Image (cartoon, helix red, strand yellow):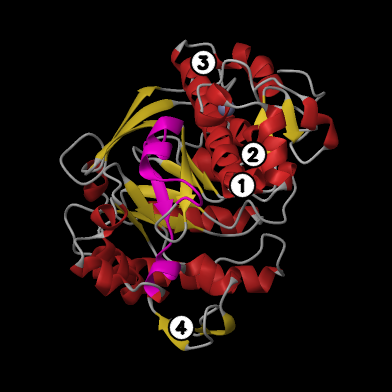
């Protein structure tokens, strides 16, 4: 792999043109930056959050709901779509965008995480991973080449290399083995990828070990990927461990022209701290998953709509929020819907949490573009809910 090919990814033609429009200040007070990522189906302003549509749908929402929430790009899962309804069927039906009627960018993951976390009886060898479907127990085998082939058939804007993730706190030998296999698989993914309207991102692993993270970052950045994913975090590590690891990776990528994507991080407070340390892209099921349990996010914390106190609360979830729930309905109505298990509850609460999350990313971008992100940090931390989104009082926030 030649280093000259890296230049192609900064502003030139290609499936992912990324321009850093506001660079971090020279004084080192933050590594937060603002950029624009041009993909085949549209532009993504960064830092940005990607809602997750596991089965080619963000649970309970349709594309109009997603656009209203402010989503400019979503993530969909290769593993799930391969198993059901099958990538070849989606390709015959015109590709993933047409299949799910979403005309903005889509990023597909590679299936590596699901193979390891969902597939039973998985066996990893040098060539690939064999696993049993979590749906029907049938046996399947993913190789780097197949993971790329599936994503090319789906036609996402961004495909990811097939990796072998491990929990951050796994034994050192396990992390080292998986990381070096991920490197060999990354080279095979680059060789297998052949779709000019689709970007390909590589994944850095390396656990929490500084030397191994350094080795992995240097290996992946020397391949001609269009973007760099930071994998193996958002697991069982502490916030301090995550931040230390980000410091290792982002320092090495300081002058790299490509976007950085931290996989699997979702709470507003965590997103903010990762942006502060130089991350551009995120995805997580968290805002939608907690919404379906009745937990909605508001400035300063969260409300649990299953609590009895909201049954008589005629105010919206969040005053001034433009989402489908807050524009029209009261907390009392939502609290009733959750108790009655009405399907509308899941849609409205999800609309709110995604609107809140995407609005928060917009606030972060505005602060970076103002040129004084460090001074805006305390206010943003307050908005995110400082103590990991502790519950706030029932009054309108
Ligand atoms: Zn709302």
Which residue: 82% across, 38% down? Answer: 307
Quadrant of the rendered image containing residue 328: top right
Q: Are marks 2 and 4 in contact (CB under 8 Å)?
A: no
Tell me the residue that label 2 is attached to.
Answer: 267
Q: Quadrant of the N terminus?
A: bottom left
Q: Earlier in the sequence, mark 1 or mark 4?
A: 4
Q: Is residue 89 left or right of residue 123?
A: left
Tell me the residue that label 1 is attached to.
Answer: 286
Q: Is residue 153 left or right of residue 346?
A: left
Quadrant of the rendered image containing residue 176: bottom right
Of tags 2 and 1, the one toward the viewer is: 1
Q: Are marks 2 and 3 in contact (CB under 8 Å)?
A: no
- The Cα atoms of the two marked residues, 2 and 1, are separated by 7 Å
Of tags 2 and 4, the one toward the viewer is: 2
Q: Is residue 258 left or right of residue 97?
A: right
Tell me the residue that label 4 is attached to.
Answer: 126
Q: Are marks 1 and 3 in contact (CB under 8 Å)?
A: no
Q: Residues within 10 Å of mark 3 (few under 14, many from 20)?
A: some
């Amino acid at each position: 792999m030649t280093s000259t090919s890296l230049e192609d990814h900064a502003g030139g033609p290609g499936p992912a043109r990324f321009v850093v429009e506001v660079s971090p200040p020279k004084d080192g007070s933050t590594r937060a930056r603002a950029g624009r990522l041009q993909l085949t189906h549209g532009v993504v302003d960064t830092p940005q959050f990607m809602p997750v549509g596991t089965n080619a749908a963000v649970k309970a929402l349709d594309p109009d709901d997603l656009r209203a929430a402010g989503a400019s790009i979503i993530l969909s899962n290769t593993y799930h779509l391969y198993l059901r309804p099958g990538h070849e069927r989606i390709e015959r039906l015109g590709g993933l965008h047409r299949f799910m009627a979403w005309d903005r960018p889509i990023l597909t993951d590679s299936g590596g995480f699901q193979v390891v976390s969902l597939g039973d009886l998985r066996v990893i060898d040098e060539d690939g991973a064999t696993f049993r479907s979590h749906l029907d127990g049938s046996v399947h085998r993913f190789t780097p080449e197949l993971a790329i082939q599936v994503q090319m058939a789906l036609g996402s804007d961004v495909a990811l290399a097939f990796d072998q993730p491990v929990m951050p706190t796994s034994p050192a030998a396990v992390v080292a083995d998986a990381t070096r296999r991920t490197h060999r698989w990354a080279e095979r993914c680059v060789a297998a990828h052949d779709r000019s309207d689709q970007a390909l991102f590589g994944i850095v692993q390396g656990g929490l070990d500084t030397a191994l993270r350094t080795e992995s970052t240097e290996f992946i950045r020397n391949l001609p990927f269009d973007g760099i994913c930071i994998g193996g975090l958002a697991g069982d590590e502490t916030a301090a461990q995550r931040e230390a690891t980000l410091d290792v990776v982002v320092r090495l990528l300081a002058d790299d022209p490509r976007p950085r994507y931290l996989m699997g991080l979702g709470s507003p407070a965590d997103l903010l701290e990762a942006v502060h340390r130089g991350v551009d892209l995120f995805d997580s099921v968290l805002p939608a998953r907690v919404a379906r349990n009745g937990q909605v996010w508001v400035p300063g914390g969260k409300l649990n709509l299953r609590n009895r106190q909201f049954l008589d609360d005629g105010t919206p979830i969040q005053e001034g929020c433009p989402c489908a729930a807050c524009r029209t309905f009261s907390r009392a109505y939502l609290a009733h819907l959750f108790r009655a298990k009405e399907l509308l509850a899941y849609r409205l609460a999800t609309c709110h949490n995604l609107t809140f999350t995407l609005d928060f990313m917009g606030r972060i971008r505005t602060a970076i573009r103002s040129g004084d992100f460090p001074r805006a940090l305390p206010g943003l931390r307050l908005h995110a809910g400082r103590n990991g989104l502790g519950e706030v009082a029932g009054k309108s926030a």
